[in-house]
Amino acid sequence: MNREIYLDYNASTPIAKEAVEAMQPFLTGHYGNPSSLHWAGIPAKDAVERARGQVSDLLGCDPTEVIFTSGGSEANNHAIKGVFFANRDRGDHIITTAVEHPATLNPCRFLEKLGAKVTVLPVDRFGRVDADDVRRAITPKTILITVMHANNEVGTIQPISEIGAIAREAGVLFHTDAAQSVGKISTDVDELGVDLLSVAGHKLYAPKGIGALYIREGTRIEPFIHGADHEGGRRAGTENVLLTVALGAACCIALRLIGMPQVQELRDLFWEMLKKRFGESLTLNGHPTERLPNTLNVNFVGRIGAEILGSMPGVAASTGSACHAGAVTLSPVLAAMGVPPVEGMGATRFSLGRTTTREELEEVVCLLDGVISGRRLA
Ligand SMILES: Cc1ncc(COP(=O)(O)O)c(C=O)c1O
């Protein structure tokens, strides 16, 4: 195996040094329950509240509008089910898009069994939903619009502010799954015009199993876990102090690095190198400009992504197609974008991170060259 090169930062990230340091005192001491009023509880409570402030600084909201969750999936589930359960007297209609993560689409499917009507809007070939389609889909029964901020597979950024204005005008609650965008691009909740926003810690250099949900003050939403009065009565259970402080520290670092200009420069250089090497046999998935700065999803036309990656086991990246018993199926995202199967079966997602180097990318181009010109895979 060649040296290990990690280009799968949209799948997960390493834990930032600062997040590890923040956790240290809570691994070896400070074991008190944040709800306890005595000397052992106070440092834990203070740490959770400091972390809440750090998350809210990144989102541009009030700390009281942030609750901690077990990750992006829980945040999406809470937003979608919580709004549905709390607003049934107002309506039963939810609007979403065809390129959402399963953590959004499956809660919507689940609610359909309970009587929800769900409209799944199409996207264009770049993976973008048309804000006017959202406007047209709104009915007097619409209670929630849920559209992801940026797509995990292709990185396309949705016109969230535009949809936010439409939702506000119609008096409909608006949720965005920002699991992939928080820490990469600006996620100021007022600029985006959202009422609810999901955060997934492990996509922004915090550990796995921690996330957050922004809930705009005044939003009608059911608690996700019923029990004691934790998290303002919205999510019962003794706080995960250890992971919460790590998320706070990770948000603090992310705030300084928003926009990721160096990462974007490397990503664009990588694309240029690939185009030079593979020319016409390479196409881009996702929006050319309205795209996460770290994400490059390309099709090696006529090839199979999984086979390409299988031939270079040292490189960690993802594919957008699955191959079962000789048949190749495109991911629902690529299918919704109308990517032709002959192109999309070669889809490979490279997602760069803070420590990605030019040398690593040059090495990947060389490896790809060997794999692709060495033998026909398709
Ligand atoms: C867009 C998006 N939403 C939600 C999730 C789920 O987040 P978590 O793994 O923290 O549950 C992911 C993770 O892959 C994601 O990419």
Image (spheres, grey):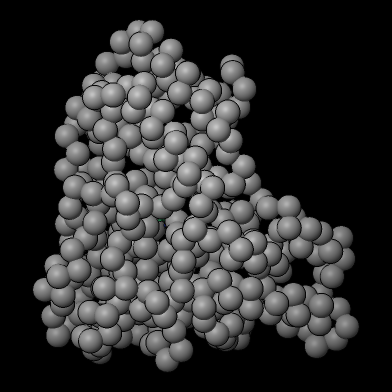
Q: Which image quadrant is residue 249 in?
A: bottom right
* Vertical placement of residue 108 versus 64, above or below: above
- Where the C terminus falls, by quadrant? top left
Q: Is residue 85 visible?
A: no
Query: How many numbered markers are drawn?
Result: 0
Q: In the rendered view, tell whether residue 315 sits above or below residue 35.
A: above
At a point 34% along the width and 62% down the height, the residue shown is 148
* Image spot of residue 230 (x, y percent): 61, 82
- Visible in this render: residue 141? yes
Residue drawn at 36 percent across, 11 percent down: 373
Query: Which residue is nearer to you in this view: 128 or 170?
Result: 128
Q: Position of residue 344 (x, y in %)?
A: 25, 33
Question: Residue drawn 54% across and 47% down?
Answer: 262
In the visual, does 310 lie left or right of 35?
Answer: left
Q: Nearer the viewer, residue 111 or 243?
A: 243
Residue 201: x and y in percent read: 57, 59
Res 78 → quadrant: bottom left
Q: Quadrant of ligand 1?
A: bottom left
Residue closer to the observer: 3 or 213 = 3
Query: In the rendered view, does 137 fall on the left or right side of 375?
Result: left
Name, please, the residue furthest toward the left: 136
Quarter of the image with the N terminus is top right
Q: Quadrant of residue 221?
A: bottom left
Residue in the picture at 74% in, 80% down: 45
**Residue 339 point in image, percent of width and height:** 19, 39
